[in-house]
Image (cartoon, helix red, strand yellow):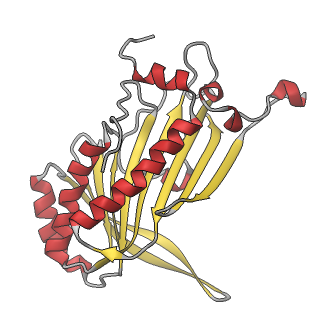
Amino acid sequence: MRKRKPLKLHKSPLVLMLAQVRFSPVLLIKDYIPAIQEELRKRKYSDYRAEQIQQVMFTGSDVKAEQVNRWVFASRDRREAVILAPDFVVYETSAYDVFETFLDKFVPVLGLLREKVSLDFASHVGLRYVDLIRPAQGKAASQHLCDTLRGLSKDILKAASVRQQFVVQAQTACGDLTIRSFDASGESMLPPDLASAHVDLALPPDTSELCRILDIDHIGRAQTDFDTSVLVNRLWDLHGPSEDAFLAATTPEAIEFWKSKDDA
């Protein structure tokens, strides 16, 4: 479980946090949706809709596209959402506080699936943190990151403009950790695969300012029982190195600034 004091950031750059648990496909999962929707509605996920997305499948030398159903259960204020598909469940939020409260919201969803669908095991468990780092305190967004992730300035390169992009891949004791950092501006600031997030995000009003995305994705691929206590332990195992990665990627000065309650 927790090994240190929760990292409470009053001016947190975190704009999207999600957890995903994958399981063996349930072909008849549509039959369980009414009962699941009724229970989630009672838990304030009252904004329901069904979606169809196109999924590209690679089978040997063939490429095949197929329509995949998924169901979205969002809170009325659109700060939280549960996304259910035949082979995964996702909980995402744009109102993250600390990891304990995040689990308080996700664990009942896992228990509900265990009860209604009788899931046997999970094949993947993952956490993903997306930080939108903005210019602050007279510093560019990149100056809130460690030297390794800042990149080369346009002055050094004698260039008119520069866009930085970094990818770090690491193998941890419990999974695959990927850290992405890239410059972002304009209306579409999120990583492309998260552009259709189902929650409202606190994006900057000035879309012309140059921000930095820090995207930390930690996935455990070991098969485990679909049991809430087991899954909670797996999520804690993934959380620790993810938080370490965030602290390593950002400066101590930035952490102190985000911790403070003042408006400076």
Quarter occupied by the C terminus: top left
Can residue 140 be seen in the rendering of this structure? yes
Residue beneath the point at 60% across and 34% down = 212
Left or right of 120 on screen, residue 150: right
State the image quarter where residue 8 is shown: top left
In this picture, residue 225 sits left or right of residue 145: left
Q: Is residue 78 left or right of residue 118?
A: right
At 40% from the left and 24% from the top, the residue drawn is 11
Residue nearest the observer in this picture, 108 or 31: 108
The part of the image, by quadrant, that contains residue 170 is bottom right
Q: Nearer the viewer, residue 44 or 134?
A: 134
Residue 27 versus residue 81 in the image, above or below: below
- The image shows residue 241 at horizontal and vertical percentages of 47, 50
x, y (%) of residue 67? 44, 76
Res. 141 image quadrant: top right
Looking at the image, residue 57 lies above or below residue 60: above
Which residue is at 20% across, 70% downward? 113
Q: Residue 136, image x and y in percent?
A: 55, 18
Residue at 17 percent of width and 51 percent of height:
46
Q: How many numbered circles does the render carry?
A: 0
**Position of residue 197 measured from the top left corner of the image (x, y, whole percent):** 42, 50
Is residue 74 shown to the viewer in this render? no
Image-based side of 124 in relation to 61, left or right: left
Q: Residue furthest right?
A: 158
